[in-house]
Image: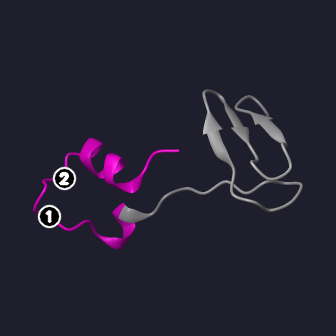
Amino acid sequence: MKRPEAEARQAGMGAGRNPTAEERKVLVERCEACGTEMYGLHCKLVCPNCGYKRDCSDP
């Protein structure tokens, strides 16, 4: 997953401008098996706790 600072730079925000609360929101995917925050790996989401994997084509 991208860090909020990287997303802010990509959105075209200047270095001296403070992002709004809405601009700082980051989508967090939770593991369906254990609830741990998952991380993106190409087109997959992987749980670092239990190893559950979800593909981007999964509903």
Compared to residue 28, the image places residue 21 above or below, namely below
Of 47 and 32, the residue lying toward us: 47
Give how far apart the Cα atoms at labels 2 and 1 are: 7 Å
Q: Nearer the viewer, residue 27 or 40?
A: 40
Residue 18 is situated, as x and y percent measured from the top left of the image, at 20, 68
Q: Which residue is mark 1?
A: 17
Which span is picked out in magenta? 1-23
* Image vertical order of residue 1 relative to residue 44, above or below: below
Tell me where residue 11 appears, x and y as whole percent.
Answer: 27, 46
Q: Secondary structure at mark 1?
A: loop
**Which of the labelled discs sits on residue 59, or is there none?**
none
Is residue 24 toward the left or the right of residue 35 in the image? Answer: left
Q: Is residue 39 magenta?
A: no
Q: Position of residue 20 (x, y in %)?
A: 29, 70
Which residue: 76% across, 47% down?
47
**Residue at the far front in the pictured view:** 49
Label 2: which secondary element: loop
Q: Quadrant of residue 36?
A: bottom right
Q: Is residue 35 visible?
A: yes
**Are the two marked residues, 2 and 1, in contact with CB atoms closer than 8 angstroms?**
yes
Please state which amino acid type lies under the numbered disc 2. Met
Q: Quadrant of the C terminus?
A: top right
Which residue reaches farthest right?
33
Label 2: which residue? Answer: 13
Q: Which residue shows up at 38% across the image and 64% down it?
A: 24
Q: Residues within 10 Å of mark 1 (few under 14, many from 20)?
A: few
Residue visible at 79% across and 54% down in the picture: 31
Q: Is residue 59 visible?
A: no
**Residue appearing at x 35%, y 62% in the figure:** 23
Q: Is residue 11 left or right of residue 41?
A: left
User: Is residue 29 rendered to the left or right of residue 2?
Assistant: right
